Structures are given as C-alpha cells and as structure tokens.
C-alpha cells in the first residue's frame, strides 16, 4: 500500500456572525481526520476588511498536517464551511466561518480558483498577526520575506487579542 506524503499547511480562520469563538472551535474540531491540527495561534478581534458595514471578526491561524492534495484540501474546507452553515454573501461580507489556505508546504501554485500562497496574505494584518504567533520566521516562498518582516509592513493598531466577556486578566505578574 502506498501512503501519500504528509504536507504542512497553514490555514486562516475567521468568523463575525453568531458565536464567533465557538465557530472557530467547531471548525478546528471538524477538520480531523482530513487535517490534523498541530498548533493554533491566539484569537484576535479585528475590524472588517473590504466591506466595512459588518461586525468585527475573530481571526485565528492554525498549522496542520494533511495528505490531501491542494485542490482536495480546498474542496474539503469549502464543504466544512457549508456544513457549519455558511451561506453565500457579498465579497468580504459577514460570514459564520471563513477558512483560507495560506501556505501548503512551500508550494507556489495558481490554478483555477486556488492560489497558494494566499495572494493577499502579505497585505492583511488580521492574518499576519496570528500567523506570527506560530511561524514568525517562516519565509514566504514568493516574496522571500519572513512572516515577521511582512508583519512589520502592515498597520496592526486595530488588531487586539480577544478576551471573552467576563474574562479576568491578571496583570500582577
């Protein structure tokens, strides 16, 4: 029996409808066995990007392993979004869950509706901040810069670590 190789992937997750934090947790919980999550960033609250008239997002990046080829991975993730209740909407509009492939190994691919690395990740603080939690020294295969270097080039002042209501934060050290 031939076993396909395992690929390292980075996925961006976002939600701004319903139980935003719960939506992120459910998406991660539904990924196995197709995607095995190996680590997850902290969760950040971020303003909407593109279409502004909508609630703020919660964003997170996860690192995982998969045996799926890129196109099969995209299909799986889009089916997962639908399974969770995502409905068609305006581009960059409100969504229950959004899952994007950021990196797939060091693959560079532009085929149909799938571009890897994600074509706009270097412009998006809401992706780069959580990605830097996991892989600050990961080098973008096209741009040649590390995630940390890309992060230094975007405005992050509206991105904040998410603290659920009622959470007590101990700042005493």
Image (cartoon, grey):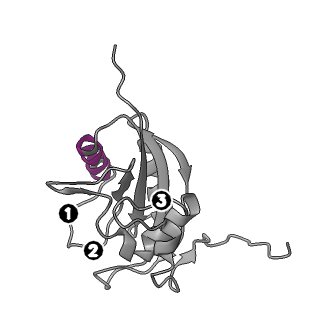
Q: Residues within 10 Å of mark 2 (few under 14, many from 20)?
A: some
Check whether the beta carbons of the residues at disc 3 and disc 1 lie within 8 A of each other: no
The residue under label 2 is 93
Upstream in the sequence, badge 2 or badge 3? 3
Give the residues drawn in magenta, as a range.
Answer: 71-81
Distance between mark 2 and mark 3 Cα atoms:
19 Å
- What is the secondary structure assignment of the residue under circle 3? strand
Which x, y percent locates residue 68? 32, 37
Secondary structure of the residue carrying numbered label 2: loop
Numbered disc in front, either 3 or 1:
3
Callout 1 touching callout 2 (CB < 8 Å): no
Note whether residue 41 is visible.
no
Q: Residue at x 31, y 62 (%)?
A: 118
Tell me what residue is drawn at x 32 percent, y 50 percent: 107
Q: Main secondary structure of the magenta part?
A: helix
Pointer 3 residue: 61
Which residue sits furthest right?
172
Q: Is residue 11 visible?
A: yes
In the picture of the structure, the residue carrying the numbered disc 1 is 88
Residue 7 x, y percent position in the rendering: 40, 40
Would you identify the image quadrant in which residue 15 lies? bottom left
Task: Give the CA separation, mark 3 to mark 1.
Answer: 23 Å
Name the residue rendered at 53%, 86% in the picture: 157
55, above or below 70, in the image = below
Q: Is residue 47 above or below residue 58?
A: below
Front-most of residues 39 and 18? 39
Question: 17 and 45: which one is in front?
Answer: 45
Residue 73, relative to residue 145: is it above or below?
A: above
In magenta stretch: residue 74: yes
């Amino acid at each position: 029996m031939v076993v396909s190789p395992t690929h390292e992937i980075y996925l961006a997750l976002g939600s701004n409808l319903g139980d935003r934090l719960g939506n992120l947790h459910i998406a991660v919980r539904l990924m196995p066995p197709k995607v095995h999550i190996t680590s997850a960033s902290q969760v950040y609250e971020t303003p909407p990007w593109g279409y502004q008239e909508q609630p703020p997002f919660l964003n997170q990046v996860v690192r995982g392993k998969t045996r799926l080829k890129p196109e099969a991975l995209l299909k799986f993730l889009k089916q997962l979004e639908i399974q969770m209740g995502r409905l068609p909407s305006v581009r960059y509009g409100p969504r229950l869950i959004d899952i994007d492939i950021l990196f797939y190994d060091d693959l560079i691919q532009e085929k149909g509706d799938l571009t890897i690395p994600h074509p706009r990740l270097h412009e998006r603080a809401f992706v780069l901040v959580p990605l830097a939690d996991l892989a600050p020294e990961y080098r973008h295969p096209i741009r040649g810069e590390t995630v940390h270097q890309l992060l230094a080039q975007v405005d992050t002042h509206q991105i904040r670590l998410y603290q659920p209501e009622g959470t007590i934060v101990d700042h005493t050290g």
